[in-house]
Amino acid sequence: MKVLSDMHMHSNNSFDAENSVREMCLGAIEKDISTIAITDHMEAPEIKLGDRSVFGNMIKQITKSVADVEAASKEFEGKLKVLKGVEIGEPMHEPKLTKKAMDIADYDFVLASIHNVKDSEDFYYLKYNESNVPALLKQYFDELLDTASNADFDSLAHLTYPTRYIIQRTDINPELDRYSEVIDNILKALVDRDKALEINTSGLRTIGVTMPDINIIKRFKELGGKYVTIGSDAHSVSKLGYGIEKGIEIAKTCGFDYFTVFENRQPELVQIWY
């Protein structure tokens, strides 16, 4: 039996997304998706700025997201499972603020991600050239290792996030083999801590591959990885569910018989039907 779940998406309670939680739910039902997690942004270091943050007041946004999800979960009961998620950005930059974010709700599912290295802008805003890319990627993967080893989360999001912008905006195709040791250490940390690796399918529509790509996903399995979550990282109804079936197919190709959804922060295995 074909079962589709999308474990990474954003409602308009995220600063960069378009549609309400309810609209995302209706879109998921229309696309025959059975389970979704609303994982609105929580850039932990921004909490201290309150209303002065360029991203908006993170505490207010996540509190509203949680309330909207709880309402939607009741409204669509029996039609769609709507999980309370959050995407915690830069969790190790300011751990006390991260703890404050984690205490807002009893989440079903926590994604951890890094959108910017410490004391720098989001990778989206940076300009790239042959001289700065190696150092940026080294710092990124070093910080991601710290996150994978120490943060409180369920799945590590879009492991190769910076490559999306590097590939889109330059002729540089980052050679990830030169970072294989630290990437292996990241994957081993996930294995040792029973954490999941996300197969982020947004890369399929932007750079032609998932984030991370099939080689890293396969390596995760070789190192003993048990859990993979699959998410479109949709910021609108139109992109909700994009590439999910392909992500599931890639998981199967890499040796996984199941993909994972989280409820009450516990992994639930969903058999892959291919």
Image (cartoon, grey):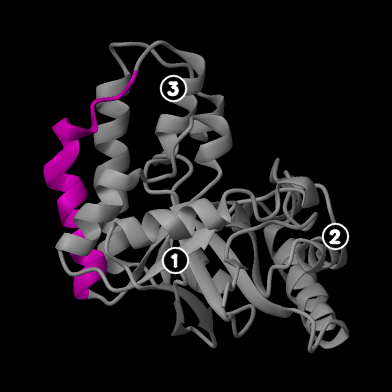
Where residue 3 sits in the image (x, y, percent)? 59, 73
- Count how many numbered circles sit on residues in the image: 3
Secondary structure, mark 2, is loop
Task: Please tell me in which quadrant of the rendered image residue 42 appears.
Answer: bottom right
Give amino acid for label 1.
Answer: Tyr
Q: Is residue 50 above or below residue 189?
A: above
**Magenta-drawn stretch, dominant element (helix, strand or loop):** helix
The residue range painted magenta reads 173-192
Secondary structure, mark 1, is loop
Q: Give the residue at mark 2.
A: 20
Where residue 213 sits in the image (x, y, percent)? 35, 43
First of labels 3, 2 by sequence position = 2
In what quadrant of the picture does the N terminus appear?
bottom right
- Compute the Cα span from label 1 to label 2: 33 Å
Closer to the eye: label 1 or 2: 1
- Compute the Cα span from label 3 to label 2: 31 Å
Give amino acid for label 2.
Answer: Ser
Q: Nearer the viewer, residue 159 or 120?
A: 159
**Residue 184 in magenta stretch:** yes
Q: Is residue 223 above or below residue 132?
A: below
First of labels 3, 1 by sequence position = 3
